[in-house]
Amino acid sequence: MPSVPRVLSIAGTDPSGGAGTAADLKSITAAGGYGMSVVTTLVAQNTHGVRDLHVPPTDFLTQQLQTVSDDVTLDAVKTGMLGTAEIIATVGDWLDTIQPKIIVVDPVMIATSGDRLLQPEAEQAMVAFCRRATVVTPNIDELAVLTGQPCAATEDEALEQAARWSAETGVAVIVKTGHLDTLTVTNTWLSPDGIRIAVPSTRVDTTSTHGTGCSLSSALATRLGRGDTPEAALTWATGWLHEAILHGAALQVGSGHGPVDHAHRSRRLQAAGTANPWLRPDAVPRALETPQDLGAPRVPTPAAAVPPAGPWTTALWEAGAETTSAIDASDFVQALVDGSLSEADFTFYLAQDALYLNRYARSLAALAVRSSSTESQQFWSQASTGAITEEADLHRTWMATRPEAARTTASPVTSAYTDFLLATTLGEDRAVGAAAVLPCFWLYAQVGGGIPDVPADHPYAAWLDTYRDPGFVTAVQGALDQVEHELAGASPAVRAAAARAYLTACRHELEFFEQALRLEPEVAASRHQAPDVALAPALSTDATADFAGAAR
Ligand SMILES: Nc1ncnc2c1ncn2[C@@H]1O[C@H](COP(=O)(O)OP(=O)(O)OP(=O)(O)O)[C@@H](O)[C@H]1O
Ligand SMILES: Cc1ncc(COP(=O)(O)O)c(N)n1
C-alpha cells in the first residue's frame, strides 16, 4: 500500500469550484491522497444553482475510464454525479472489470439548490449501482429513494431504513443527518452485520454547505484507500469537513450557498510551520520607562476575566490582546467548549498538559528560590505545589484509564514552551521569569471566563469547571500582583525583556492549545489495519470496542 493513496473521482463538474470534480480533487488532496478525475457531465452551475448541463458521448467516458485504469493502480474510487442510466451502466461495467478495493458511492440525485442531477428514470439504475459499493453516502432524501421508503423524519428512522437496506445488500451505509433539524450532525457508519460507528459534530450555522456531500465521500474514500479503518476514516473526514464548513464563509465565494474551505487545515498547518519569528523586532522598545512606552493596542482589547493588578499588567494585557483573542477564537477552544472535540484530541491535550505542569511547577519553584521577600517566596512555592498537585490529579483521574496517554512523551510544542519557561525563570532576571509564567495563569482564567454554563452531560464539563475554580482565580490575582510589583521595581531594560517574555509565552499558549488539532491518527490507523476485502462485514464487535479507547 503506497503512503499516498491514488484516488479516482468519477463525477460532474462545478466551474465555481464548490462541488463535483473540483470539490473531490481538493478533498482528496486535503485527505492526503493523489487525486484523479473522470468527468461524467459538464454542469454550468454556481453557488445559486444549475443553468445547463452537457453530457459528452458515453464512448468518450469509456475512453477516459480506460485510459486511467490502463496506466494507474487505483487504491480507491469515488463516484458522484452520474446523471443518466447510460452513464451508470458504463461506469458499472468498468468497475466490474477493474474491481477496485474501495468504492465509495455518493448517490447524487438533487443538488442543494433543488436542481436535478440525476434523471428521474435513472433512479432505479442508481439504486442497483449502489450494490457494488464498499460504502454509500446518501443524504436523507437519497436514502429514501435507495430504500424505497418515505423520507425519514428522525435520525432513528434513517438508521432503521439504512440498517435494513445494508443487511439486505451487504453494503455499508453512512447515515448523514445534515438535512435533519438536529443540533448535532452525526455521520454513522452502518455495517451489514449491524455494527454502528457514530461520529457526531456540532451543527454549524452557515449557508456554506455547497458540496459537503461530495467532500465527505471523497475524503472518506481517500482515508479508506490508504488503509484506515472505517472508524478512523470517518472520524478524520467528519472532523476535517467540520473545520472546512466553519471557515467556508470567510472565502467569500459567490452570494448563494457558498463552498466549504477545503484547504483551511493545510493553510493553518502551513502558517504554524513557518520559520517567521513570533515577535516583530520593534514589537517591544529596548527600554520601558513607563507602561505607555509599550504602545497603544494594535487590536481591540478583550475585557480581562481577572483584571490587571496595576498599570504594568494593564500594559501587558493590551500588548498581548491579539494572541489572547486568537486563543478565544481558536478551533480547539471552541470545540472544547461546544463538546465536539474528539476524545482522542482531548486525551492528547491532557497528557501534554500533565507533562507541561510538571515542568511548569519547576519553573514556579525556581521563582520561589530567587524571590526576595517571604510573601513572594510563599506565593511561588504554593503555586508550584498547586501545579504539581494538579498534575497528579490528572494522572489519577483521566489518565489512569488511558495507559497509552500516561506513557506519552512531550510534543515539540510542549517542549518548546517548557524549555522556554525553565530557561527564563532560571537564567533571566526574576522579573522576566515572573512575566513568562503569567500567561499560563491569566489566559486559562480568560478562557474559563468565556465559557458558558454547559449541560451536565457535556463530555468535558468536569474539566471546564476547573477553569473557573475560585481557588484558581485567587492564584491568578496573586501572580498578577507579583508581576506588577516586579515590573514596577525593575530597570527599563529588564521591563522590556519581561514584556517580550510575556508576549512570547502568550504565543506558546496559543500553540499549546492548538497542537491537538495538528495530530494525525497514525497510531489508530496502524493498530487497526483495514481488512483486504468487504470492509464493513469484517469489523468485529471486539474491534469496535477497542476503537473507543484507541489512542492516536
Ligand atoms: N450545517 C452543518 N454543520 C456541520 N456539518 C455539516 C453541516 N451541513 C453538512 N455537514 C456535514 O456535511 C456532511 C454532508 O452533508 P449533507 O448531509 O447535507 O449531505 P449532502 O446533501 O449529500 O451534501 P450536498 O450538499 O453536497 O448534496 C454531513 O454529514 C456533515 O458531516
Ligand atoms: C457536479 C455536482 N455534483 C454534486 C453536486 C451536489 O452538491 P450540492 O448538493 O452541495 O449542490 C453538485 N451541485 N454538482
Image (cartoon, rainbow, N blue to C red):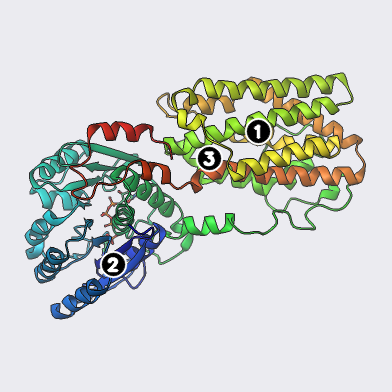
Q: Which mark is residue 333?
A: 3
Q: Residue at x 41, y 51 (%)?
A: 240
In-front residue for pair 494/134: 134
Q: Is residue 448 visible?
A: no
Numbered disc in front, either 3 or 2: 3
Image quadrant where one finds the N terminus: bottom left
Q: Residue 462 appears at what percent x and percent y?
A: 49, 24
Q: Residue 9 appears at what percent x and percent y?
A: 27, 65
Numbered disc in front, either 1 or 3: 3
User: Quarter of the picture for ligand 2?
Assistant: bottom left
Rendered view: 268 above or below 464: below
In-front residue for pair 441/316: 441
Q: What residue occupies the far front of the structure in this picture?
A: 1
SS at mark 2 in the image: loop
Image quadrant where one finds the C terminus: top left
- Looking at the image, is mark 1 or mark 3 earlier in the sequence? 1
SS at mark 3 in the image: helix
Task: Report crowding for label 3: few under 14, some 14 to 19, many 20 or more residues within 10 A (C-alpha).
Answer: some
Q: Residue at x 29, y 47 (%)?
A: 178
Q: Label 2 belongs to which residue?
A: 49
Q: Residue 189 appears at what percent x and percent y?
A: 25, 43
Q: Label 1 belongs to which residue?
A: 305
Rendered view: 414 above or below 20: above
Task: Report crowding for label 2: few under 14, some 14 to 19, many 20 or more residues within 10 A (C-alpha).
Answer: some
Is the CB of the residue bearing disc 3 within 8 angstroms of ligand 1? no
- Looking at the image, is mark 3 or mark 2 earlier in the sequence? 2
Question: 394 left or right of 38?
Answer: right
Give the amino acid type for the residue marked by disc 1 in the picture: Ala
Give the amino acid type for the residue marked by disc 2 in the picture: Gly
Question: 485 left or right of 535?
Answer: right
Rendered view: 498 above or below 249: above
* Res 369 → quadrant: top right
